[in-house]
Image (spheres, grey):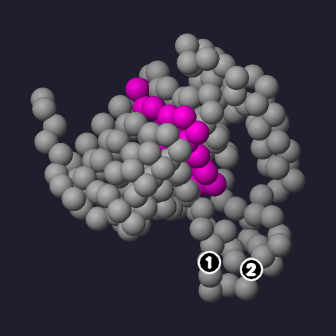
Amino acid sequence: MKPNIQINPYQKPWSLSIHLVLVLWKVTWFLLCSWTPKFLNPWRLLILRLFGTKISGVPFVHQSVQIRIPWHLTLHHRACLGERVQVYSLGEIEIQQRATIAQEAYLCTGTHDLDTSSFQLITKKITIGENTFIGVRAMILPGISVDKNAVVGAQSVVTKNIAPNQIVAGNPAREVGKRTVAK
């Protein structure tokens, strides 16, 4: 689902019907999931599936996670969204198997076209690869791919794609090492 063309910066990029479904989503998550203990993860996954999240296997989603548009999210087996993670899924986000997104990380798929007077919303997919680790309060910007076995350090801002086994940290994130994954 692509955002609507905006004529001015005050026009909403989504239709009224999408806004109503998103209100229903927020109310549902708040009432049925936000208070649940960890062992009720299957219940949270069921609610996510009902709202269009593509789920394979058994990922883990913490009850305090905030997901903007659940039908733009894909979670694979043993993917983990930690406490207070922000999934700003205006566009697609795919989290592959065994990838961990630590506390308060921010995955943002939306930006704006600064060359238009309407500041048109632009969305770009984020892909988090297999067996990766995204550190506490890290920020992943639109269009970024974090390849398999990579590590993003705490409070890093990722502005470029991360190669396999790369360890990055800082703002903007830069390579600080290579990861050796035991077989």
Instruction: Pick whichever of labels 1 and 2 is earlier in the sequence.
Output: 1
Residue 138 x, y percent position in the rendering: 45, 52
Residue 93 x, y percent position in the rendering: 51, 48
Residue 8 sits in quarter:
bottom right
Residue 65 x, y percent position in the rendering: 60, 36
Q: Amino acid at mark 1?
A: Asp
**For the point 76% across and 36% down, which residue is it?**
25
Magenta run includes residue 17: no
Q: Mark 1 — residue?
A: 113
Magenta-tinted stretch: 73-94
From where the camera sits, is residue 133 visible? yes
**Element class at badge 2:** loop
- Residue 83 vs 178, above or below: the answer is above
- Residue 14 vs 172, above or below: the answer is above
Q: Are marks 1 and 2 in contact (CB under 8 Å)?
A: yes
Q: Which mark is residue 35?
A: none
